[in-house]
Amino acid sequence: MHLNFTSEPRLADGVIERDFTLGEIPGILWTPESISTPVPLILLGHPGGLTTMHARLAARARRAAADGFAAATIELPGSGGRPKLAAVDEARTDLRRALGAGEPVNPEIIDRLILPLVEQAVPEWQVALDALLTLPEIGGPVGYSGGVISIGVRLALVEPRIAAAGLFAGSFVPRAIFDEARQITIPLHVLLQWDDEWNDRQAALDLFDAFGSREKSLHANMGGHTGVPAHAGEDAAGFFARHLR
Amino acid sequence: MHLNFTSEPRLADGVIERDFTLGEIPGILWTPESISTPVPLILLGHPGGLTTMHARLAARARRAAADGFAAATIELPGSGGRPKLAAVDEARTDLRRALGAGEPVNPEIIDRLILPLVEQAVPEWQVALDALLTLPEIGGPVGYSGGVISIGVRLALVEPRIAAAGLFAGSFVPRAIFDEARQITIPLHVLLQWDDEWNDRQAALDLFDAFGSREKSLHANMGGHTGVPAHAGEDAAGFFARHLR
């Protein structure tokens, strides 16, 4: 499947931004304005909703471009204008109800919320990767950055072209994904918001401990889910610079 | 009390290194080769033994100098050629015996090992700071970097000239120091070796949680006590660059 560029290139801050579709899936590609050789690529993960997330994604792409990297993202299944995933939406409603009532979250709800998303999103990321790597300006190696962490874990496990991953420990993780984490061996950079209202700290620490990678770092910062400090982005950029250059 | 320089300046890699004594206490000062204005200062903490630690301290000082900072250290009480602290040595023997036997460590041993060191070392660091800040090439602000973490905590609490601290979560911490940690408010950068054979991971995480600072980051990396990766030093340097410049 090929990328179809659906917008004129937009140039800002030394970065060229282009919208594309991959079949029915919308996406965005950012490349440094001036490049002479094919550049490494960072896949930008996110919780879904490219329009809502655009400003934050573009900022991460600018940081990647400053290091000479391209960045790309695609919409998640069920998000943005894509067909709804009724079962996932139902699980999300159940999760919010449990959290709102202060009840412990049944792991079965997490499975219903996350596993279908992982099952559908990971092959889509792989198809996107196939298409992105045919572009003359993009070479490799390839990194994955951001959430949904379960998607990042599965992708790191099944996709050998992912050389390094920067993961955001900010979501509920099914037991099956936790077990997959033990098999991951690529370098990992894990970001944890210490007082994340959407995340169980101990579960995040346990997941970090479980990763099989010999090189893994946990960077914990103060604040809630959306309060990641700017310097955390700098440290993550340093991680990718070490592993993708 | 004044610094008495006891060696010729040694120039290497753009850094001038000078030995000094402060009364009976030996120390080392590193300054960038070319500076025009008084520079910030990083106090380099360590577990004792300037001769043994010299190569590692000099490497940290070079990193500080690359950012335009001076660095200085003094010998710990009871270490190097300084008079032995018999009670501390006895506590260390008791600790090793307990660890060697696989026994739980009685907190009373930790108190006997660490508290006398803190009580004596912290005022010495303050006297050294007084003397260092009279030098024309050293201005401020001042940071504290490294172990012994209990010394860093006490110094950060009682010495208002310490603007930021990078601490190494690699030692046993008395309950009294743990309580002092809650009162710390300066920015903190805490390094944790995830599989540190000399450190209880959960105790380190609890201490990080206890710090009162609104800005604090925990950077956990793989490996044992002495296996801190080079990139951890880069991240720590970024922390001091943000807070001392």
Image (tube, coloured by chain):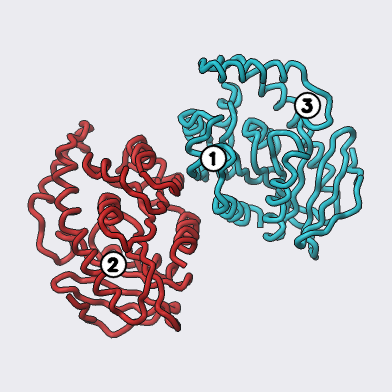
Chain colours: A red, B cyan
Mark 3 lies on residue: B78
- Element at badge 3? loop
Look at the picture and state if A32 lies above or below A142.
below
Mark 1 lies on residue: B213
Q: Position of residue B239 (x, y in %)?
A: 58, 52
Categorize mark 2 by other alpha carbons within 10 Å: few (<14), some (14-19), many (20+): many
Q: Position of residue A132 (x, y in %)?
A: 28, 74
| Count of numbered tags | 3
Q: Considering depth in this image, is A166 or A53 the residue closer to the camera?
A: A166
Please give left or right for residue B241 compared with residue A140 in the image: right
CA distance for labels 1 and 3: 31 Å
- Element at badge 2? strand
Categorize mark 1 by other alpha carbons within 10 Å: few (<14), some (14-19), many (20+): some
CA distance for labels 2 and 3: 58 Å
Please determine if labels 2 and 3 lie on a single subunit.
no
Q: Tags 2 and 3 in contact by the CB under 8 Å rule? A: no
Which residue type does callout 2 highlight?
Answer: Thr
Mark 2 lies on residue: A73
Q: Position of residue A103 (x, y in %)?
A: 20, 31
Residue under the point 50% across and 60% down: A238
Look at the picture and state if A1 lies above or below B207.
below
Look at the picture and state if A189 lies above or below B202.
below
Which residue type does callout 1 highlight?
Answer: Ser
Mark earlier in primary sequence (1, 3): 3
